[in-house]
Image: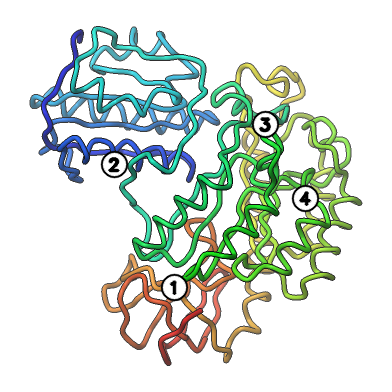
Amino acid sequence: MSALSLDPGRVMMVSLGCSKNLIDSEEVLGGLIEAGWQVIDQAEAADLIIVNTCAFIQPAVEEALEAILEAAAVKARRPVRLVVMGCLVQRYGRKLGRNIPEVDLWLGPGEFARLPDLLAKGSDQNLVLGRPAYLRHSGAPRSLSTGPGWAYLKIAEGCSHACTFCLIPKLRGKYRSRTIDDLTAEAGQLLWAGVKELVLVAQDTSRFGRDIGQGLIGLIQELDRLPDLHWVRLLYLHPDEVDQGLVEAVAESRTVIPYFDLPVQHAAPRILKDMGRQRGPDELLKLIEAIRQKIPGAVIRTTMMVGFPGETDREFRELIDFMGAVRFDHLGVFCFSPEAGTPAARNKDQVPTQEAEARQGEVMARQAEISRQKLAPWVGQEVAVLVEGPHPESELLLAGRTWFLAPEVDGKVIITDGSARAGDLVRVRVTRGHDFDLEGEIIASSEG
């Protein structure tokens, strides 16, 4: 539909994909709220539906298309405008408009910040797509959807690695860091809003600042100076980029918790090389041992990939053995997806889907056993817990996280006794352990 123009009304956002995408959604909603829009969560009552898409792997593409078609079905029943933004648009461009004409406006990931202006002034284009060069700044509005008590802080955009299975550099552009001054300004705004935990994210957090003559250690040192900041969590630390200096900076930090998210992807030398990774399994083991030696009790999280082209039974067993040697505290695993445009997708030696899924199941079963053993010693101990709100399965229980549990990807602390508000930091005595969760009772408030 040409000349898209809308007066402020009611808007619903469907945000898909990763935490970095969620921040984009929060920024769009922040801009629309400033322009007079009201955010709601019911499509049937909305004047505008926005779908923020992911297109990293085929399952994400399918999820995005399903969400768009669901919104299009609403549009068939009642007057509503439909905007689709994000990586799906960057990946498929004009093909989308030809196949899904119900969408009024398609926005690439570098263009989403223009949406309030496009709606106010009208646009004769239904596809706004350019080179992804946008970089968030502290002056941009933002409507938090996490917490209360915690928020993501996106410290960079894009990626300059050349992993052979990944489309992110094509979808999001080269790595672009924000400045330390700008990030501390936004961190201050979030603390003023009641945030106690900042979760730093980027496609590669450990690479921060190298493109602008700064660095992650410098950012850590500046965040340490902020009053009322309890926890800083570093996610997405590329194993090839982490060095002893960063480990020492975490050890010395007042706020950064010793939680290392190192997505190693695999443990077989041939596969790591074919993925475009620099460090082999022996170097990865040395890195993890150095972290644990410097910071006893440090928590290590990782992500693994099974079914990479040519993965043999022997190479899969190397992965399982590596898990046993490291005993990761937390682990996620996904099956390789052959994405068009990546070198790995052109490899003819693809692993059958059924076999990859069986390997995925075995990895998670093994990790459940390790996680249960890792959590068992916490029973009887007291921990600081950031309360997130009612447990999703029961209004009679509360749920929260302690320092060694990251939001959305790790387990929970299920609070079975005591009362608190979402966003409170409380002391909890752990009473029981599960595969990935803990149970406990509130014994006091806490300052972390």
Numbered disc 1: secondary structure: strand
Of badges 3 and 1, the one in the foreground is 1
Examine the rendered structure and indicate whether residue 61 appears above or below residue 14. above
Amino acid type at mark 1:
Leu
Answer whether residue 325 is visible to the viewer in this image: no
Q: Residue furthest right?
A: 282
In the displayed structure, does residue 394 sit left or right of residue 329? left
Place of residue 448 in the rendered image (x, y in percent of width and height, measured from the top left): 51, 79
- Residue positioned 42% across, 27% down in the render: 86
Q: Amino acid at mark 4?
A: Val
Q: CA distance from mark 2 to mark 4?
A: 34 Å
Of discs 4 and 3, which sits in the foreground?
4
Residues at circles 2 and 4 in contact by the CB criterion of under 8 Å: no
Q: Nearer the viewer, mark 2 or mark 1?
A: 2
The x and y percentages for residue 288 are 81, 60
Identify the residue position indicated by label 1 in the image.
386
